[in-house]
Amino acid sequence: MARTLAAEGACVLTEVLDAHGRLDVLVNNASGGSIINVPSVGGLVGTAPLPAYSAAKAGVKLLSKCVALHCGQRGYNIRVNSIHPG
């Protein structure tokens, strides 16, 4: 028997809560042709005490740009953005 999307979402939430005890942020936009990635401002300006963190966040920024170019070149009509809070 196939699970509904709501049941699958509940299962994912249960697994996250069991593993980590909390869920800080969840962004899910399955419709509307949009992908939104949320790295922090650490991907725009490096921080001396956290070089790996800054590099990872910068990677998400560049991944967003590359996926946007890929989708645009192939005419997929999917918008890709990154938002950098902080």
Image (tube, helix red, strand yellow):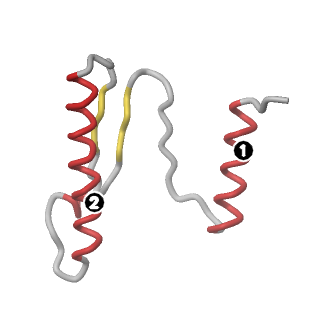
Residue 29, position in %: x, y? 47, 32
> Which residue is at 24% across, 31% downward?
70
Residue 2 circle label: none
Would you name the residue on which mark 1 appears?
A: 10
- Extreme-bottom residue of the structure: 49
- Extreme-front residue of the structure: 74
- Residue 7, picture quadrant: top right
- Residue 46, picture quadrant: bottom left
The amino acid at mark 2 is Lys
Would you name the residue on which mark 2 appears?
A: 57
> Which residue is at 35% across, 49% downward?
38
Residue 69, position in %: x, y? 20, 31
Residue 33, position in %: x, y? 39, 23
Mark pair 2, 1: CA separation: 28 Å
Q: Left or right: 42 with respect to 26?
A: left
Q: How many discs mark residues in the rendered view?
A: 2
Name the image quarter holding the C terminus.
bottom left
The amino acid at mark 1 is Ala
